[in-house]
Image (spheres, helix red, strand yellow):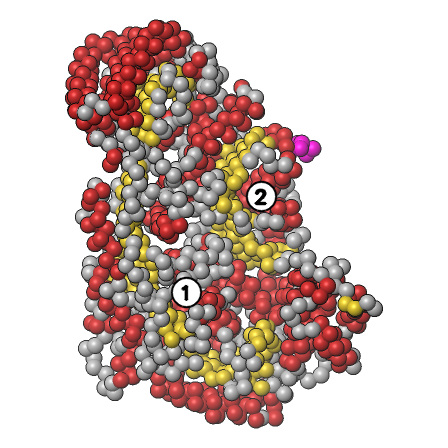
Amino acid sequence: MTELMLPDSRRCTYFFLYDGRRVKGEGDPTREGICYFYPEETPLDKQELLCGQLAGAGRCVSELSSSPVRVLRLRHNTFSIRMKDDFFWALGCSVEVSTASVCELLDQLINLFCFYNGSVRRSYQLNSQETLAGRWAWYLSHLQSGSLELHHIFSCLRTIDSTNIDPLLLLKAALILQACQRCPLVAAGCILFRGRVVSTQMSPDLTMKARRSNGPNTVSSTTVFLTTSELQYLQSAPVDKDFSSRTTPHKSTPTRKSRLSRTLSDTPSTESEPSDTGSSQSPQKVSSGPRSSCSSVLSPDPSHSFAEPPTQQLEPPLSNGKHSPEAEEEVLDESYYHSFHSNRDEAGQMHNEGDGSLFGENSHANGGGGDGDTACGTVFDFIGAEESHGDNVLQEVSRGVRGKVPGHSAEIPDPPRAAAFDHQGECPLVPMTLYLHRVKGLVLALLVEPHFLSDTESMEEVYHSSLASLNGLEAHLRSISPGAPGPPGPYIFAHFDCIQSTLTTNLSGRAGGAPERPFVRATSLLHSHFCNTETLQEAIIRSAGAAVYGTRSVAQETYFQQHGGSLRNSGIPNHQDSAFSLPGKARHRLLKHGVNLL
Amino acid sequence: MKCLLIASESAEVLFYWTDPEFLQNVQSQYEASQEDGQGLPAFEDSISTLFAPIIISCSTMVDMLEDSYASFTTENNHIYILHQFDECLYIAVNGDGEEGEGDLRRKIYVMKKMTEVLFGMVTLSSSLLRKELRPQDTEQRARLWKLLQSLLETYSHLRENDQSFLVEAVERLIHPTLCEQCIEFLERRLVQQLNSSAERAGEEVMHAFILVHTKLLAFYSSRNASALSTSDLLVLIIMAQNMYPSNTDVDDPNPEDVESTSGSGPDSFYTPEPSPTDRDSSSSGDKVRGGVPVFEFLDPDVQMAEDSLRTLEVPQPDPSTPRRVFLDVSLKDVLYPMMPHSMYCLPLWPGITLVLLTKIPTSAVAMSVYTFLEAFAKLEKRLSEGLEGSAATRGQRTIHDVRSKLDKFIKALGPSEIQSRQLQVDWTEFKSLAFTRGGPAFSKDLIASCRKMTTQLCGVYRQCFLLQSGSSDIPQRLSPGLQERAQSMVREKLMDWKDFLLVKSKRNITMVSYPVSRIIQLAVMPCDLTYLEDFPGLIHFICVDRSTGQMIAPSLNLTERNTSELGTGPLAHFIKRKVWSLVNTTRRYLQKGFSTVTLRDGDFYFCYFLWFENETGFKLEAGDIPVLPDDSAPIGMLAWDYYRKLLRYYSKNHQGEVVKCYELLTVHLGVIPAEIILQHCRQLASKLWEPSRNPLL
C-alpha cells in the first residue's frame, strides 16, 4: 500500500543534542558540546553555528523569562526545543508542519531514547558518542517511518485496519495478552503485526515506544525505563494488585485521566495502596526520593529543569534493588505461587477455548485452502525448531540480556539497573524489562519485572502458553490480504480516538494524493484549533476547493469532506449551500465505518 | 509583561516601550547581579544588555544561514516575536497571556507603519532612520520616545477596546442626514474658505474630517486630492486620539477629565497627572488609558529622570504648529508613498475633533526624490541579483532619463539652503562609474554607489521635510488665526449636535436600535423593530466593506451603567472576549485560504464569511485565496493592507470589473438551528450594504 507521505518523507530537517556542560570555558570549542547532529552529513561548521546560536539565543530568552524555551521559530524552520540539565535538544521541521506536531515529535524522540537507555546524562557517561548517535538516528528514522501525514498530525498509533479483519482475531490477540498477564511478573503487553498494533494493554505512549522493528523469530528482552507516571498507570491496571503495586512509589495524583479500554476483564481499579507498605517493606527504595516531586519526563517541573543547580543529596543509586535480595525473593516466591496455583488452570482453559473457536471458524473460512496449510506448517516448524534449543535460549535470556544470544545481537546492551537514578535533576526512571517474542511479522511485547528473566519457570510458562496462539494468530493475520484501496469514495473522513490514540480513515494516500491535500491541511488546522480551544465543539471551514467539517467530543475527533457536487458559490451566506449540509452527511455516511456522531 | 524594542544590528537601542511589569522584571534581574553600593544602570542600558545576545545572534544567523529568528515561546508561555526591517530589528514580547503571536506581529508592523507616517522616506535609509529614531541629544530622544511610546499605547488601547481597530476598518457615525450636512459644510464653507485665504502660506487643504471619539462623522476630500488610504486614515485617528484622548469608557466624564484632556495641546506628549478620580481607583482593569501611559516608576533614579523629562516640556511647542505626516498619494495611477502633508488637529470639544490635512508647497520635491529613490532601489536589486549591463536597467525608465532629471534636480537644489554637496559628490562618482566612455557599465561595483545615492537622497528629503521649520524664516503653515477661525466655524455648526454626537458615538447602532436600512427608509421609526426582534438569537455582528475600509457593528458598551441589551459586567466582557478571539481565529483561517468559517463554541455559534461582489451588487464566485506563511504580515488594513492585495489578486480574473470585498461576522446563541442562523447571515449581508445605505467616503 502506497501511503501519502511528505514529499521527501523526512519531516525532520534538523535534530541535535547539545551538551552545555562540555562547553563551559571560554575557549571550549562549540563542537565539543555537540552530542548528536542530524543530518549527520551537515558540515561541522554549520553544525557548530546552529548549535551555538540556537543554544545561546535560547539561553538568553529563558533567562529573560525565567523559563526554558519550548519553541523557536526561524523563517524557514520550526524548532521544538527542550532545555534540561544543561542539555539542549532542538528538532526542526519545515514551517508547514504544525508546531504542535514538531513538539510532539521531539517529546517522542526523547522519551523513546529514555525508554531504552534511561537517563541521557548517564547514557553518555556509559556509552561512546558513536553508539548513542546510532541510536538517536535509529529512533529518529523509526519515528518518521512511513505513515500517513494524518498519523503525524494526531501523533497516533498505527493500528491494523480493523475493518478488514475478523473481529475474533482481535479477541484472540487480547486473550493472548491476558493469558500472559496471568503471570504476576508481567505488567502489560501488546501485540503488533508488521509494525501495526493489533491489541494493547498499555497506554498509547508506551505502546508507541514498545513498537519496534521486526527481527528474527526469537525471544529476546531488553531493559527499558519507565517514568513513574507510566509505571503507576501500568500498575493501576486491575491485574494482580498485590504484586504489581510492589514497586510503585506512592503518588497521589495519577497523571493520566483516561485508561485504555481493556479487552475483556476490565474492572475498575482501586487506585490507592497503603502508602507506607512500599517503604516499610523495602526501605532502600526511599532513596529514590525525588520521584514524588517529579511528575513525569513529559512535563518537567520548571524548578527542576532550569536554573537550579542539582544538589548532591542522594546516596549512590546502585543500592537500588541490591540491598535486600531476600525481600525480593520473598515477593517473587509469593508471586510465583500466586500465578501458578490460582490462575494457571483458568488461563489454560480460556486459552484453549479461544484457540479452538478461532481455529475452527477459520479453517471453515479458509476452506482448507493452501494458505491455511502453509501457515500451520510454518507454525509447527517453528515450534519444532524452538524446542530443539528452546531451553538454551531461555536460559541465556534468564541470565540477563547481555547481547550473546543471536536474537539479542541487535539489542542494546543492558545498562546497569539503576542507571536511571544517577542524576537528581532528572525525573527518576524505573527500570523494567521488555520481553519480545517474535513470530515472523508478529511481535508479542510484554513489560515484565526485571527478575522475570531469572524466573525460568515463569518465562517458560509465558513462552509456552502463548507460542501456539501466536503462531496461529500470525498465520491468520498474514493470510488476510491488505484490502486493496477501494475506488476513491464520494467522501473522505478521519476519525481520531483520543483515548486510545488511534486513527480510522479512508484516506489511502494514493499516488500523489493531490486531491487529498486540502483535506489534510484543513484537518491539521482544525485539530490544532480543537486542541487550543476547549469549548469548541464543531466547525465547518471552506476554501475555494474544499469544505471540511470537524467535530469533537471528549473522546474523539472526526473530520469529513464530501467530494463531488460543485462547490461553486459566491461565498456569501446561504443556507442552501452544500457546505452546511456536511454535518448531516457525516452522521449518515460514517455510521457504516462504526463512527457514531449522533 | 509587555515590551517592544527596536534595535540596530549592533544592538543599539533605537526605541523601547515596556509596561511597568516588564520594567520591574528587568530591574530585578539587575538587582540580583548588582554589587552592593552600585546603582542600577540606566534602563536603556539594562534592556540593551539583556537583549544583546539575541540581537547579535540574529544578525549572525542572517549572515551565515540566511535565516533568522521569527519567534521564541517559553514553557511559561512568554512569547517573543522578532522581525527585521532592513537593518532595524523589532522585538515584541508578551509574558501575561494577553497577546498572541499574531497580536505581537501586528504591533511590530503597526510600529513600523507609524515610523513611516512620522519620518516618511527617511525610513528607506537605515542609517538615517537610526539617527532619526535615536537623536544624539538625550532631551530630544526622550521627547521622541515618549511620543512613540504614547502612540503605541494609544494603539494598543484602541485595538483592545475599539471594534474598528479590532477589524482595522473605519467606523462611521450612522446618521445620514447630519453626515450629509456636515460633508456639505466642510466642502462649501470650510475648505473653500481656507483654500481661498491668504493666510494659508501656500498650503492647500486636501482632506478635512470630523472625528467623534474614533468614529467618523464626516469626511471631505478636495477634488484634486487623491483618496486617503484606510491605513493612513486609521493611523491619523490614532494620532488624533493620542493628542486628545477621549474617555469613551466612562459614561459621564467628570469635569476633571474634561479639563485634563482639553488642556493638552498638540505636540505635547508628556504624561498628564492622572487625576485621582474614583474611576481610576475602581477600574483597575482599565489602567492603561488611551494616550495616558501609566508608568509606575519604582526606582528613585528613574523617577528623577521622569521629573527631568517633565521640565523638558517647557517651552511647549506652539500648539498651532502642525504635525508633519507622510501619506500615500496616487496620482494618475502612480502610487507615491510617504508624501509630506501637514496635519492640523483642532479640538472642538472633548471627544470631538476636526482634522485638516494640507499639501505643503514643496511636496513636488518629494515626488522627484521618490522617483530617483525608486530607480536606484531597482537598479541595486537587479545588480545584487547578478544581472549586469543592460539587463540591470531593463524595464524601467531609461537610466539616461533619470540621469538628466537628477542633474537638473541637483542644480535646482544648489541655490537653496539645502545642503546637497555630498549628494553632488556621490552623484558625480556614480556617473563616472556607470557612464564610462564605452557606454554604461552596470556591474556589481555599482551597488555601493547606489546605496550612497539612496542615503544622500533620503538626507535631502529629511532636510526638506523633517527639519524644515527649524530655520529662521516664517513657518509655513496655516496661520493660527485661520486655524482658530476654522475651529469656531465647525464648533458653531455642531453646537446643537454636540451632546447627541457624544452619546451617539457610544451607541452608534445597538442590538436594540433600528436596522440601518429602516432609518433611511422610514420617516417615522417604528419602535418595535429591532435587530433583536428581526434576528432572534443574534447576539452580535460585525460587517466590513473591505473595498472602502469601513465597518458597521453594534456598540459593545462595557462600562455602561444603565443596562444595555447585553447586560453589564461579566457577560458583556465575556461576549467582548469572544468577539475579539473570533476575529483572530477567522484571520488565521483566512491566512490559510479559508473564507467561510462556522464554529460551535460553548453556548455560541459563530459565523464568518468573506465574499466578492461587483459594483452592481452581483455576487461573484468565490475564488482561491492565497495561502500565506505563519509569519507573513498581519491580515488587516492598518499596517499592511491585506485586502487591497487580495482584491488585486482576485481581480486578475475579473478584468474590467470593479470588485468589492465584504466580510460578515456573527455571534448567535447555540440553540438556534443552523439553518436559521444562516438565513440571518444572508439577510444581514444584504441588508447592511444595500444601495440605500449611507453616502460613503
Residue occupied by mark 2: A57
Instruction: Describe residue B133's horizontal placement relative to residue B172 as left or right.
Output: right
In the rendered image, residue B422, in percent from the top left (x then y), is placed at 78, 69
Does the image show residue A130?
A: yes
Q: Nearer the viewer, residue B637 or B162?
A: B637
Residue at point 18%, 12% (across, down) = A345
Magenta stretch: give its range: A25-30
The subunit letter for the residue under badge 1 reads B
Does the image show residue B506?
A: no
Instruction: Describe residue B209's horizontal placement relative to residue B278 as left or right.
Output: right
Number of marks? 2
Res B510 quadrant in image: bottom left
The subunit letter for the residue under badge 2 reads A
The numbered dot on residue B460 is: none
Reply yes or no: does residue A26 show up in magenta.
yes
Res B204 quadrant in image: bottom right
On whether disc 2 and disc 1 are found on a single subunit, the reply is no
Residue occupied by mark 1: B166
| Mark 2: secondary structure | helix
In the rendered image, residue B263, in percent from the top left (x then y), is placed at 51, 76
